[in-house]
Amino acid sequence: MAIIQKETSNGRALGVWKIEEDENELLSQTIGLDGIPDKLRHPNRRLEFVAGRALVRHLMQELGEPFEGVTSNEHGKPIIKNSSCQVSLTHSFPYVASLVDVDKPAGIDLELVNYRLLKMAPRLFHVSELRDAGRNPVKHTIIWSGKETLMKIYGKRDVVFSEHLRIEPFNLNKEGGELIGHILIEGAEARIPLAYRLIDNYVLVFTR
């Protein structure tokens, strides 16, 4: 089992898994899996899919919750079968990560530090985010990952990333830190506390 990071407290569990197993080894570590979707043909994508389900099973065991498998709703959001626990999954090979919360919305996103965001950000970021990120690719990736996390909390696709999903200015620390996100849509605003971690050359953002 290649879980390289785990945090469990107050009815929530977070884990990061570095994939070192083959597909059969991973399949033996999960249950309730109705096969691997046909659209996932690349070997790495198949490994990510199964490793994510194996990780959720482990986190549910950490929380003392029964686990029957993971399915998804009409928007593609993962749901734990026959459970009120909230779950979010993310992957960027060779890592997968998941956050499970017994009663609160869960969101998590993992991204390789992306230098291309320096060119793409003007289309995706609010002016305040562009000002805060400057020319720092790590800050750009944290902001992008924060927006993806907010997207998973919102759970639908009808958003404009530069306007509806916002990350407040923050200080960048090597050990990780805290963020504040906002979902502004349909005349309402939700303030979402987030946290970030830096793992090798990857950024992990998740709900607090």
Image (spheres, rainbow, N blue to C red):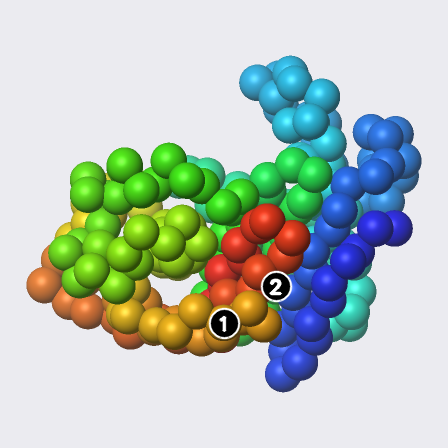
In the displayed structure, 5 sits above or below 152; it is below
User: Is disc 2 in contact with disc 1, using a CB cutoff of under 8 Å?
Assistant: no
Locate residue 29, reporting x and y percent: 86, 45
Residue carrying label 1: 173
Q: On the picture, is 31 further left or further right than 129?
A: right
Three-letter amino acid code of the residue under disc 1: Asn
Find residue 189 and report its image quarter.
Answer: bottom left
**Label 1 crowd bin: few (<14), some (14–19), many (20+), radius 10 Å:** few
Name the residue rendered at 69%, 56% in the picture. Answer: 16
Could you tell me residue 35's position as x and y percent?
A: 72, 27
- Res. 190 mark: none
The answer to whether 54 appears left or right of 198 in the picture is right
Residue at which label 2 appears = 100
In the displayed structure, 126 sits above or below 49; it is below
Q: Residue furthest bottom?
A: 10
Closer to the observer: label 2 or label 1? 1
Secondary structure, mark 1, is loop
The foreground one among 68 and 104 is 104
Q: Residue at x 43, y 69 (%)?
A: 172
- In the displayed image of the protein, which residue is found farthest to the front? 135
Mark sitting earlier along the chain (2/1): 2
State the SS at label 2: strand
Q: Place residue 164 in its image quadrant.
A: bottom left
Nearer to the camera, 7 or 85: 7
Residue 63 lies, in percent from the top left, at 73, 72
Q: Nearer the viewer, residue 116 or 77?
A: 116
Q: Amino acid at mark 2?
A: Val
